[in-house]
């Protein structure tokens, strides 16, 4: 049987103080996307993420942080957040200016895009790990390691030159080190604590079945849809009696706008064997009561739905014809 772990749930034990046992790494990171169209036009986009959850935006005209959840400030005071906001504002403006000034010397060719992912990863029983990665045109370019900037192999001499340039600024290294090694983990602990109610919520999935014809008339493609669940970890499979069907294939777990998740799981099956099948879903919101939906029930539902599906359009068509005739 599959053992379900609840990544974020495990982070904070009920009622405890902050630095407790982790079961999974938790990361917080900022994403920066800087697009340089030509010598004079560039823009920055910024966002903050707690694992896969968007927690912060960046209003680039005003140079202000957008707090997307009631708990997005964590336990930082307004004064601390204003300091950070000012730092990011200066950084974003300076970043564009420096890159534009050095673009031709560094052989960066317009139009180009730089992406930055910077933050920290928290593991149980280990000290937090800070990171700062930069990509140029979508591939690894350079990163911050051990107090200095190191080119990625893919970045070639261009990345080496950029590193040589920025490694001269001791102050930048110290600031980056302080942010990713100290501020970031502190912020994450505060965030997890403040967002506890939201991050530990349990939302039950909706499950329904559908099918598509395949190239062969004797086979059906059965689809089990699982939608609207939270947290993300879920176990879904097609069963035949008590037997897990090994040919079950699973799509990616996709985000829904309300912060929950969607997943489909498919199985190719001989039409005549489909009757014994069921889709089984296990999720933390369900406790030990798995959702099981039988294909045979789905078929009997369809016997009711199909005639309606045929009759309704027919009636509509007749109605239209009648109206049409009257008008003529
Ligand atoms: C630079 O790019 C921007 C945005 O694409 C464009 O509107 C502008 O006309 C361009 N300027 C020059 C000098 O090419
Ligand atoms: C927020 O909480 C973390 C973890 O308890 C702590 O290390 C940090 O100092 C706190 N920050 C503030 C501003 O209180
Ligand atoms: C970081 O630098 C220190 C001192 O220069 C060195 O002892 C250590 O091995 C380095 N660590 C890594 C991961 O490169």
Image (cartoon, helix red, strand yellow):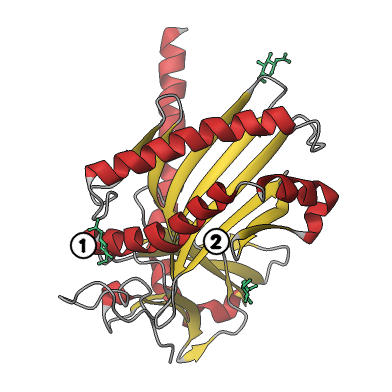
**Image disc number at residue 197:** 1
Q: Quadrant of residue 61?
A: top left
Q: In this view, does 293 lie above or below 175?
A: below
Relative placement, left or right, of 134 versus 287 is right
**Farthest residue, direction top:** 328
Left or right position of 116 against 326: right
The percent coordinates of residue 4 (x first, y second) are: 39, 82
Q: Quadrant of residue 270?
A: bottom right
Q: Which residue is drawn at 32% across and 78% down?
A: 10
Label 2 crowding class (10 Å Cα cut-off): few <14, some 14-19, many 20+?
A: many
Give the residue number, with chain letter if any, for mark 2: 131
Residue 242 percent location from the top left of the image? 45, 92
The N terminus sits in image quarter:
bottom left
Please report the residue visible at 61 percent of the width from the left and 76 percent of the height from the top. Answer: 269
The front one of 90 and 20 is: 90
Name the spot of residue 303 as percent of width and height, x first: 42, 62
Residue at position x 45%, y 33% in the image: 89
């Amino acid at each position: 049987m599959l053992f379900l772990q609840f990544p974020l749930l495990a982070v904070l034990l009920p009622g405890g103080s902050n630095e407790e046992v982790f079961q999974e790494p938790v990361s917080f990171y900022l994403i920066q996307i800087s697009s340089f169209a030509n010598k004079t036009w560039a823009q920055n986009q910024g966002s903050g993420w707690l694992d896969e959850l968007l927690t912060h935006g960046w209003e680039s005209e005003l140079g202000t942080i957008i707090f997307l959840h009631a708990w997005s400030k964590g336990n930082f005071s307004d004064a601390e957040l204003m300091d950070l906001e000012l730092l990011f504002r200066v950084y974003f403006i300076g970043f564009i200016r420096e890159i534009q000034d050095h673009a031709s010397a560094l052989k960066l060719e317009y139009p180009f895009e730089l992406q930055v992912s910077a933050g920290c990863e928290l593991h149980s029983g280990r000290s937090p790990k800070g990171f700062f990665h930069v990509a140029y045109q979508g591939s690894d370019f350079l990163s911050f390691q051990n107090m200095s900037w190191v080119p990625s192999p893919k970045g070639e001499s261009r990345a080496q030159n950029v590193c040589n340039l920025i490694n001269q600024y001791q102050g930048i290294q110290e600031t980056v080190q302080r942010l990713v090694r100290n501020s970031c983990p502190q912020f994450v602990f505060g965030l997890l604590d403040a967002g506890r109610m939201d991050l530990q919520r349990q939302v039950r999935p909706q499950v329904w079945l559908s099918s598509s014809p395949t190239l062969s008339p004797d086979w059906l493609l059965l689809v089990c849809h699982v939608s609207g669940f939270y947290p993300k970890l879920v176990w879904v499979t097609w069963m035949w009696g008590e037997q897990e069907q090994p040919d079950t294939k699973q799509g990616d777990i996709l985000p829904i706008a309300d912060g929950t998740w969607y997943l489909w799981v498919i199985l190719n099956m001989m039409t005549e064997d489909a009757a014994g099948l069921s889709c089984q879903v296990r999720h933390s919101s369900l406790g030990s009561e798995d959702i099981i939906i039988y294909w045979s029930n789905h078929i009997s539902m369809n016997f009711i739905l199909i005639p309606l599906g045929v009759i309704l359009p027919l009636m509509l068509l007749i109605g239209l014809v009648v109206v049409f005739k009257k008008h003529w």
